[in-house]
Image (tube, grey):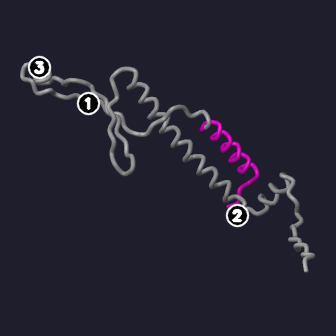
Amino acid sequence: MPFSPDELRKLRHRREELRVLLAEIGDLRPGSLVGRFRKCGKASCHCSRQGSGGHGPSWSLTRRRGGKTVTSIIPAGPAVERTQEQIAEYRRFRSLARELIEVSERLCEAPIESPAAASEEGAKKGGSTRHSRRKSRAKSTRS
């Protein structure tokens, strides 16, 4: 189904919005942040009592790198909050990039589905309707 000029305008506007949002992306990192509670194994420790949560949480960031799972220890405190923000920013980046690809694909398909829209866009940009011809090369004067 051909795109109307209004739909094309909206798609171009959304593409520009997405580009601006992507330019504003801050620090990001992929992965999952997990807080773990562990028991140390000492009989006299509070963690050995029934119902105790154990020691922790100790935080670890897990992600895939080069086909392998890599785990990094994140120290408790501000580093955990900062890591959570970076992971959220990564997810936001992925979402925006995915949407930009979808919008761009639709814009790329528009001239295919609607040749009139493509020629109209060319006219707006000041494109020539005349086809260029290749000029022949000058003959050499060498003998």
- Magenta-tinted stretch: 1-22
Residue at the spot 52% in from the left edge and 42% down from the top edge: 95
Q: Residues within 10 Å of mark 1 (few under 14, many from 20)?
A: few
At mark 1, the secondary structure is: strand
Within the image, what quadrant is residue 20 found in?
Answer: top right
Task: Give the farthest residue toward the right.
Answer: 141
Amino acid residing under circle 3: Cys
On screen, residue 51 above or below 24 = above
Quote the CA–CA distance across marks 1 and 2.
54 Å
At mark 2, the secondary structure is: helix
- Residue hosting label 3: 45
Q: Is residue 34 magenta?
A: no
- Picture coordinates of residue 106, whole percent (x, y): 64, 55
Question: Which is more toward the observer, 7 or 108?
Answer: 108
- Picture coordinates of residue 71, whole percent (x, y): 32, 38
- Residue hosting label 1: 36
Within the image, what quadrant is residue 138 found in?
Answer: bottom right
- Residue hosting label 2: 112
